Image (cartoon, rainbow, N blue to C red):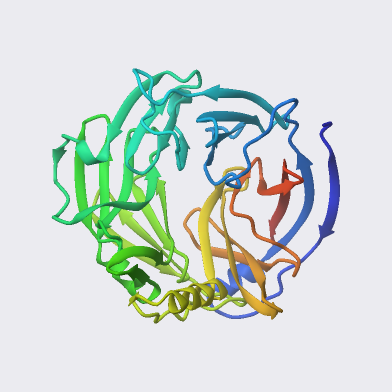
């Protein structure tokens, strides 16, 4: 189909908070406005894989391409965001010299020199844009120098890849995932070394975790999300239930934190759920309660405006059995000071995939099985 680009809505909103402390003074000196539009991606005669809502996708360095992993075909789709077309589809091998080790990949990350890092959380491979593999690594059978996981522990969900693609950070903890993570494992793919770093702050998330089992067998887990991000020589942690950011400084092996305040959402989710249950109904009820509470998203960087953005959402009200959310967009400077937060329109729906590119925030949108993006173009000025 022909690419369409039309203006949906225009808002001009100016912050007007008052106060005497530095945070309030900083916010009241900022004028914030934004516009919205929607664009479609022309896939030609092919279909862009949308069954996973672009969850397994990653932005190339420089932002021209979006790498989308096609789980049905074990292939990478190269989506040209500059011209809004599907540029090509690259089939990948599972076995053999260029084999990526698994048919399904959950993480896809851009590295230097056009390399792409693929992860299924147990096997990592690095391929170039022609599908040639330069590296492969399996977590349950590695012979790296350095520390080993304690008995009964292994990597769990949660990873981040350094910009050069040579260092990967993974959360680790109980193999059963019945407790919050115990820390971070740092794998250097170049030197083939590993460091195991216990981090106690993850224990703060224990009240937000429920482990569901049937006859002693794991059947489900509800937990707070932990967001990882690499910036220079620091690893950033944030989570979905508290309005904080933690900084693990690799050079000094120390942790600092920043806590924020919101005018629109709770500072912290209520939590205090049962940590274990063998009742399916109790488990379902807990998951429903979790969905209603505040959910702080990951930080993502806008290199044109030099701003980190973050979405947060929380139940506003119920409409029958449907949860209606309020969604907040917050801006932080490069030192992670809060600049501004904006309550978005009541009909705004936050998708599972979003990113910043060329000063705009792209939000995934499926329109009749065709890929589109709603784009927020913010403008921030200082008085």
**Residue 53 appears left or right of 13:** left
- Which image quadrant for residue 122? top left
Tell me which residue sits at (33%, 73%) in the image.
Answer: 206
Question: Compared to 117, does 340 lie above or below?
Answer: below
Tell me which residue sits at (36%, 44%) in the image.
Answer: 121
Q: Quadrant of the C terminus?
A: bottom right
Residue found at the very far front of the displayed protein = 215
The answer to which of 314 and 234 lies nearer the viewer is 314
Question: Compared to 156, does 276 lie above or below?
Answer: below
Question: Compared to 319, does 82 lie above or below?
Answer: above
- Which image quadrant for residue 318? bottom right
**Residue 379 appears left or right of 27:** right
Tell me residue 216's x, y (percent).
27, 68
Tell me residue 323's x, y (percent).
65, 73
Tell me residue 153's x, y (percent).
21, 55
Tell me residue 341's x, y (percent).
63, 67
Tell me which residue sits at (50%, 78%) in the image.
Answer: 285
Please tell me how many numbered marks the rendered image carries.
0
Q: Quadrant of the N terminus?
A: top right
């Amino acid at each position: 189909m022909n690419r369409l680009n039309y203006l949906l809505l225009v808002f001009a909103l100016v912050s007007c908070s008052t106060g005497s402390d530095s945070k309030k003074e900083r916010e009241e000196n900022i004028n914030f406005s934004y516009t919205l539009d929607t664009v479609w991606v022309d896939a030609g005669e092919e279909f862009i894989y949308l069954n996973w809502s672009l969850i397994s996708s990653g932005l190339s360095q420089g932002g021209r391409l979006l790498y989308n992993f096609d789980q049905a075909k074990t292939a990478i789709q190269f989506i040209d965001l500059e011209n809004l077309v599907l540029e090509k589809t690259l089939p990948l091998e599972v076995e053999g010299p260029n084999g990526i080790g698994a048919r399904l990949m959950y993480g896809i990350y851009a590295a230097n020199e056009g390399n792409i890092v693929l992860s299924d959380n147990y096997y990592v491979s690095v391929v170039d844009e022609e599908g040639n593999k330069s590296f492969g690594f399996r977590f349950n059978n590695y012979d790296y120098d350095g520390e080993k996981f304690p008995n009964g522990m292994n990597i769990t969900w949660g990873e981040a890849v350094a910009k050069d693609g040579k260092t990967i950070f993974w959360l680790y903890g109980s193999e059963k995932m019945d407790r919050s993570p115990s820390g971070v494992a740092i794998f250097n793919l170049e030197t083939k070394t590993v460091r195991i770093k216990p981090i106690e702050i993850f224990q703060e998330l224990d009240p937000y975790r429920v482990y569901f089992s049937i006859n002693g067998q794991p059947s489900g887990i509800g937990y707070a999300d932990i967001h990882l991000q690499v910036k220079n020589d620091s690893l950033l942690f944030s989570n979905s239930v508290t309005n904080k950011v933690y900084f693990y400084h690799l050079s000094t092996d120390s942790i600092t934190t920043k806590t924020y305040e919101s005018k629109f959402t709770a500072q912290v989710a209520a939590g205090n759920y049962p940590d274990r249950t063998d009742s399916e109904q109790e488990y379902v009820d807990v998951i429903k309660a979790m969905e209603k509470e505040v959910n702080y998203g990951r930080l993502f960087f806008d290199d044109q405006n030099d701003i980190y953005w973050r979405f947060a959402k929380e139940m506003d009200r119920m409409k029958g059995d449907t949860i209606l959310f309020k969604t907040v967009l917050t801006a932080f400077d490069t030192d992670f000071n809060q600049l501004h937060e904006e309550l978005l329109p009541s009909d705004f729906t936050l998708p599972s995939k979003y990113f910043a590119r060329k000063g705009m925030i792209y939000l995934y949108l499926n329109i009749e099985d065709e890929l589109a993006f709603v784009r927020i173009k913010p403008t921030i000025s200082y008085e």
